[in-house]
Amino acid sequence: MAEEIINRVANSVLEVFDLEDYYPVGTRTQLDISQWLLDGFLLKEKDFREALKNHNWEQYQNHFVAIHCSTDAILPAWAPILVATYVTPFAQKVVLGNLAELDIALYQEVLSSLDYSQYQDKPVIIKGCSKKPVPESAYIMAVQKLQPLAKSIMYGEACSAVPLFKKGK
């Protein structure tokens, strides 16, 4: 007589924390300031302001926008701020940086607004192997939120998790 196979993972109190579940859905756009600079490098204030005024900002409606400069232009501090004043009325979120930095900012926002109480005194596994572009720093943010509560924290999949933290007795 064959022994019944028991799925201990399904029957455990293990809580899975999957960062993909919190991936902010939306169009991500990198907005390059160099397009409004003379030869991509020189900011002439009058021309810069005119170019911004004439740009179609509505195309960024509901986008997550990262403002950056793809050239080595030396910009005054106010230049990206001025760009932000034009795109902010249309975008969901605006950051200074690249798309990777935008995703980090989005995760900071999402992870700081979650209720983590369901993980109190429970073993937690932070799911790895994401299909979505979850930034590595989001895992560190998650650990910082979970560690004060969780009984233990592991990383990976239930079948091959790496232990990260175990609360002392």
Image (tube, rainbow, N blue to C red):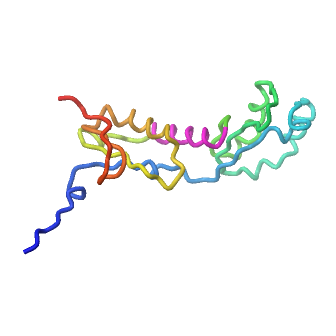
Looking at the rendered structure, the number of numbered marks drawn on it comes to 0
Asked if residue 110 lies left or right of residue 148, the reply is right
Asked if residue 123 lies left or right of residue 132, the reply is left
Does 103 lie within the magenta span? Answer: yes
* Residue 38, image x, y percentages: 91, 36
Q: In this rendering, is residue 134 above or below 131?
A: above
Furthest-top residue in this view = 76
Does 30 lie within the magenta span? Answer: no
* Residue 119, image x, y percentages: 29, 42
Tell me the quadrant of the picture where the N terminus can be found. Answer: bottom left
Q: In this rendering, is residue 57 above or below 148?
A: below
Furthest-bottom residue in this view = 1
* Residue 110, image x, y percentages: 49, 42
The one nearer the camera, 110 or 66, is: 66
* Residue 54, image x, y percentages: 88, 45
The one nearer the camera, 1 or 63, is: 1
Dominant secondary structure of the magenta stretch?
helix
Q: Residue at x 86, y 37 (%)?
A: 40
Asked if residue 136 lies left or right of residue 90, the reply is left
Furthest-left residue in this view = 1
Q: Quadrant of residue 3?
A: bottom left
The one nearer the camera, 7 or 49, is: 7
Tell me the quadrant of the picture where the C terminus can be found. Answer: top left
In the image, which residues are magenta? 98-112
Q: Residue at x 71, y 38 (%)?
A: 67
Q: Residue at x 44, y 48 (%)?
A: 19
Asked if residue 147 lies left or right of residue 42, the reply is left
Q: Residue at x 41, y 38 (%)?
A: 142
